[in-house]
Amino acid sequence: MRLINTKTFHISEHSDNETPKYASLSHRWGSNEASFTEFRKKAEQNFQKTATQSQEGLVKIRRCCDLALTHGFRWVWIDTCCINKESSSELTEAINSMFDWYRKAETCYVYLADVAWKADTTEMQQASMSRFRQSSWFTRGWTLQELLAPAKVHFYDQDWRFIGTKDELAQEISGITQIDIQYLLPDRQDYLEKPCTSAPDCRSHSAPVKYWSGGRKEPSIATRMSWASRRQTSRIEDMAYCLLGIFKVNMPFLYGERQKAFTRLQREIIKNSNDDSIFAWATDSYGTGVLARWPSDFAQSRYVYEQAPIITHRRPYNMTNRGLSLPMTYGTWDPKTEILDVVLDCGVCGTQGFRNIVLRLKRSGKVWNRVWSHQIVTVDEGPWSCPPGLSRGLLVREQEIRDVIVAPSVMKTVGTEIMVQATWSVGYGPTHPLRGPLVSNIKRSPRQ
């Protein structure tokens, strides 16, 4: 990785085994950031003089270096100028390594360009905290890993005035980001709660949790996805790429694939994890596949908890070129509606106790489609059984199907417009069509 010398402003490369202690910078990119090539040229000159106020990106780098130097750091890592983005291979390696680079930093400085912090009086402090809560830094996809990965995070306002640390502001940050404090501060034992007590309607009963990692409670995949559900990125693909480190997966970058990047991310997660909560999401679509379309589908999944496979004896599942090959262990079958509920190894905690989440399916030929995807469906804890004839497993469709057919039925002229009345249908397999009316007015040209 490349690091900037805080005294000389020169960039040097360091191997993984010989990386010195360093600080890092987290910030929202502006319109005048300094690239790797531009910064290296400036560093060869008198950088202190060339970084004028008109060059926002260079000033930001200089102020960060000055701050790190006062804290005793000789080196600092800044994403804008320590990565040569002209090299696609280097960019891929950097993004796949970025979570670890932030995690290994001794301190991460968060620069909030849209916050002016003044705490001279109680009223001024309250107004400043309001601006802090509204900072766009908390809405961006890339800054999520920059908040979670480093152990020490220091926040600074637009004039580099110190606001506070992640520890000191944990309660506020939790309210802003909807991330429970035990995940923001995993090393703080005083914030370590029982698996379900953070749910708003929990009665403080325990819930089965799959594992603890290094004494820390590991959040489910659905919970981690919920943290990104309200965030945005400038490029569509980056909404998937910025989550790689959070889910501990790696994959190549294909800018231009758009939403397919998030589908690839889910496939990679399934390859590396047996956490069923990746299917615990809800959307406003009907009859979608088993994979979510976007992180926003996990907005309701903050309090979804993974549990041990010993509860349902789930066998391994995998993604095939025809869909998800899902072993059938426990579930319920309704012969009247032909609806199958597959019990997943995850659940939610509420007033009625811990309830398992089910995948609600309906057969379409040899493939099963997900239905009732507008909500997360739950059932009581057992006893369950394996419906007859399904012990060999299921093939569940991966992606949603939208075969839209518009059939015109009436066309007539009304004044200067042509009114078209039609019916539309969206097919999710032969058993689940949706139909409705369509009325459209089309302007006539003067020659018609």
Image: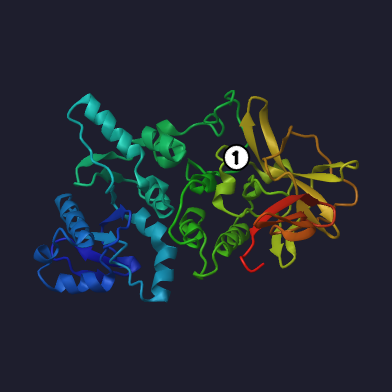
Q: Nearer the viewer, residue 64 or 112?
A: 112
Q: Which percent across, then down, holds residue 57?
A: 23, 61
- Quadrant containing the N terminus is bottom left
Residue at the location (49% across, 59% down)?
Answer: 244
> In screen coordinates, is 164 left or right of 299?
left
Circle 1 Cα neighbour tier, 10 Å, few/some/many (<14 / 14–19 / ≥20): many
Q: Which percent across, then down, holds residue 385?
A: 84, 41
Q: Residue type at mark 1: give it.
A: Val
Q: Nearer the viewer, residue 284 or 122?
A: 284
Residue at the location (46% across, 62% down)?
Answer: 235
Using the rendered view, name the quadrant where residue 130 is placed: top left
Q: Which percent across, then down, holds residue 354?
A: 66, 31
> In screen coordinates, is 408 left or right of 278?
right
Q: Nearer the viewer, residue 306 or 32?
A: 32
Q: Is residue 42 above or below residue 400?
A: below
- Count of numbered tags: 1
Residue at the location (36% across, 47% down)?
Answer: 136
> In screen coordinates, is 175 left or right of 356?
left
Query: Secondary structure under badge 1?
Result: strand
Residue at the location (60% across, 39% down)?
Answer: 304
**Residue position marked by numbered label 1 in the rendering:** 304
Task: Please name the colour scheme applied to the rendered image.
Answer: rainbow
Q: Nearer the viewer, residue 163 or 208?
A: 163
Q: Which percent across, then down, holds residue 120?
A: 17, 29
Q: Is residue 30 above or below residue 276?
A: below
Q: Is residue 146 above or below residue 215?
A: below
Residue 47 seen in the current view? yes
- Quadrant containing the C terminus is bottom right
Residue 168 seen in the current view? no
> In screen coordinates, is 392 left or right of 86?
right
Residue extending farthest to the top is 203
